[in-house]
Image: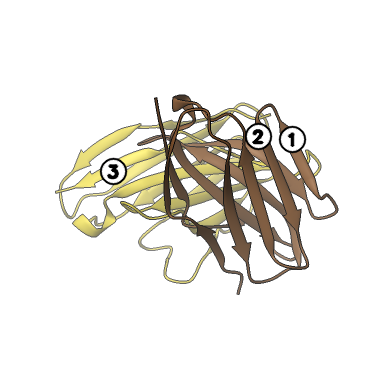
Chain colours: A brown, B yellow
Amino acid sequence: KQEVTQIPAALSVPEGENLVLNCSFTDSAIYNLQWFRQDPGKGLTSLLLIQSSQREQTSGRLNASLDKSSGRSTLYIAASQPGDSATYLCAVKGNYGQNFVFGPGTRLSVLP
Amino acid sequence: SAVISQKPSRDICQRGTSLTIQCQVDSQVTMMFWYRQQPGQSLTLIATANQGSEATYESGFVIDKFPISRPNLTFSTLTVSNMSPEDSSIYLCSGGDRGRADTQYFGPGTRLTVL
């Protein structure tokens, strides 16, 4: 059974810092991996989707990498801003499943 | 991309009653999913709903408690039956379709409080 973990559980940084969020998964037979953002009391916003054949994806200040063999993905946020404050969720879709398995999330606070 | 809306956005209900949550997608999607997010927790899949077939429920979730309808490719409902305070959660609808980069889109969620 796929299990997804995220480290750290919470992170507080001053504005302007670069930061890395980590995601680990136990079963490397994945179809894809997706990073989401969730604002308090709101739904999820898709940030980046990485297919199993890809190593990384970039969107603006965000860069996500995938190392299937080691069961890891990282989300890199450059020049963080207070508006980046949210919970970031990593989700993995297996080769034989139709749905995502979510990690517990990293709660990020960017202080002005 | 697909835009997903949910109704209601939030509700406060009495113990023992039932609530039906509606999920509308602005385009046809093959698969729709219902998730629960309990306070301070991540998302847990309740069931997968495909048109024309019975929903597939995850371990710990049963049809009598969470009946689901999927009458067409753009709409689904989830009913939370005989509610108790433990059902207080955010319920999220999601849709996806293999062939569109296989991403998954989420609705804004329904925040349910059971007294």
Dot 1 and dot 2 within a common chain = yes
Per the image, label 3 sits on a secondary structure element best described as strand
Tally the numbered discs: 3
Depth order, front residue of A40/B25: A40
Depth order, front residue of B100/A10: A10
Q: Position of A112 compared to B85: left or right?
A: right
10 Å crowding of disc 1: few (<14), some (14-19), many (20+):
some
Depth order, front residue of B107/A51: A51
Quarter of the figure that contains the N terminus of chain A:
bottom right
- Location of residue B6 with respect to A95 vertically, above or below: above
Circle nearer the viewer, 3 or 1? 1
Question: To which residue does mark 1 refer?
Answer: A58
Residue at 53% from the left image edge and 34% from the top image edge: A17
Name the disc covering residue A62, or none. Answer: 2
**Do residues under tags 1 and 2 come within 8 Å of each other at their CB atoms?**
yes
Depth order, front residue of A69/B2: A69
10 Å crowding of disc 2: few (<14), some (14-19), many (20+):
some
Dot 2 and dot 3 within a common chain = no
Name the disc covering residue B112, or none. Answer: 3
Residue at 53% from the left image edge and 63% from the top image edge: A5
Q: Position of A18 compared to B18: left or right?
A: right
Q: Report the Cα–Cα distance between label 3 and label 1.
A: 35 Å
